[in-house]
Amino acid sequence: MTDDYKELLVKVAYQKAREAEEEKWRRENAVKEASSFSTVITNCARCGETHQEIKMVSFRRPIMTESGPAWTHWATCPTTGEPILCNIEMD
Ligand SMILES: [Zn+2]
């Protein structure tokens, strides 16, 4: 077996492992229905104010990091119009 051939086999194995990982991720993070609830936000991350009855909406696919979901929900700051991101653990 030549070194070039071995290198090719390693590349193919790596590619397959990567595709399997991506497929697993897609299954686990399949698009879900968004859900929402209203809550009070104090010390808003965008403007620093308190907002009453802000609609928090779940991401259909949370923003992920290697250690798990970083952001699961979002809302819109009524003062700036910018997004407020939250990580809310649901049972
Ligand atoms: Zn705000």
Image: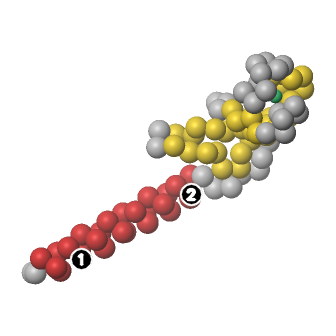
Q: How many marks?
A: 2
**Ligand 1 is located in which of the four quadrants?**
top right
- Taking the spot 50% from the left edge, 62% from the top edge, the residue there is 23
Query: In what element is the residue under mark 2?
Result: helix
Is residue 90 in view from this perspective? no
Q: Is residue 6 left or right of residue 60?
A: left
Q: Which amino acid does the dot numbered 1 rest on?
A: Leu
Based on the displayed image, in which of its 4 quarters is residue 52 positioned?
top right
Callout 2–callout 1 Cβ contact below 8 Å: no
Q: Residue at label 2?
A: 27
On the image, the x and y values in percent for residue 76 come to: 82, 37
Q: Is residue 78 left or right of residue 21?
A: right
Quarter of the image for the N terminus: give it. bottom left
CA separation in Å, label 2 and label 1: 29 Å
Badge 1: residue crowd in 10 Å (few <14, some 14–19, many ≥20)? few
Q: Which amino acid does the dot numbered 2 rest on?
A: Arg
Image height check: is 6 above or below 24?
below
Quarter of the image for the C terminus: give it. top right
Based on the displayed image, in which of its 4 quarters is residue 59 positioned?
top right
Image height check: is 28 above or below 91?
below
Q: Residue at label 1?
A: 8
On the image, the x and y values in percent for residue 68 come to: 52, 40
On the image, the x and y values in percent for residue 62 come to: 64, 45
